[in-house]
Amino acid sequence: MATVAVVFGRDAVCFADPQVAGPGDGGAAGPTHLIDRFGFDPESHRRVEVVFTPPRPAAPGRDLAVGPPVGTVVPGASDLQPAADVLPLVAGLGPADLELVGNLPVRAQKLLTAPFDAAHPVQRCSWYYQGRADRFEVFAVVLAGTGQATLAHGSRVIPAGHDDRSSHWSLVCRRVTVLGRSRE
């Protein structure tokens, strides 16, 4: 079953997973929740804003091989790479998780995934978004592991003439040290 609630606070991130208790589980049979808690060092919170407003993509039929004159700096151009070329495999993330994170600006992808590797994989990933295809009023993704937890939250809009790759994002990325994990 899917996680039904995630709360990210000063002291912990908690994931509430639906469960069905049986008569031998010490209480009444029926629906209940397992709380998976990653406790934080409250003094370790770090915060970075990521505002990504790339230029509109080239008009159809324009020869992209020509590009701008040599030496021209195009703001945001380094971030306009396909997710498959930017986001390497991240230990603990499945294909759907990688696809979701790969939709974010490159800087946000790096901030979210940097603390995770084969020795310290992502143990929990959850996301939520609310809005329409061209506008997410609310967006959040949480990654948690044994040593670190990361969160990106904010909004996204696709202005007229833009596409998914040139979406405008306004995000806050957070990173915090995990001291321990418990399940209740």
Image (cartoon, rainbow, N blue to C red):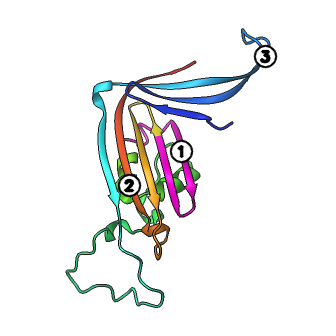
| Crowding near the residue tagged with mark 2, few <14, some 14–19, many ≥20 C-alpha atoms within 10 Å | some
Give the magenta range: 114-142
Q: Which residue is mark 2?
A: 170
- Label 2 to label 3: alpha-carbon separation: 44 Å
Mark 3 and mark 1: span between their CA atoms?
Answer: 30 Å
Query: Residue 100: where, in percent of width, then height?
Result: 52, 54
Observer able to see residue 54: yes
Residue that label 3 marks = 29
Q: Amino acid at mark 1?
A: Trp
Is label 3 in a helix, a strand or a loop?
loop
Instruction: Name the quarter where the C terminus is drawn.
Output: top right
User: Circle 1: is it few (<14), some (14-19), or many (20+) Cα within 10 Å?
Assistant: some
Q: Give whichever of discs 3 and 1 has the lower sequence position.
A: 3
Residue of label 1: 127
Residue in the picture at 62% in, 24% down: 34
Q: Position of residue 81 (x, y in %)?
A: 40, 68
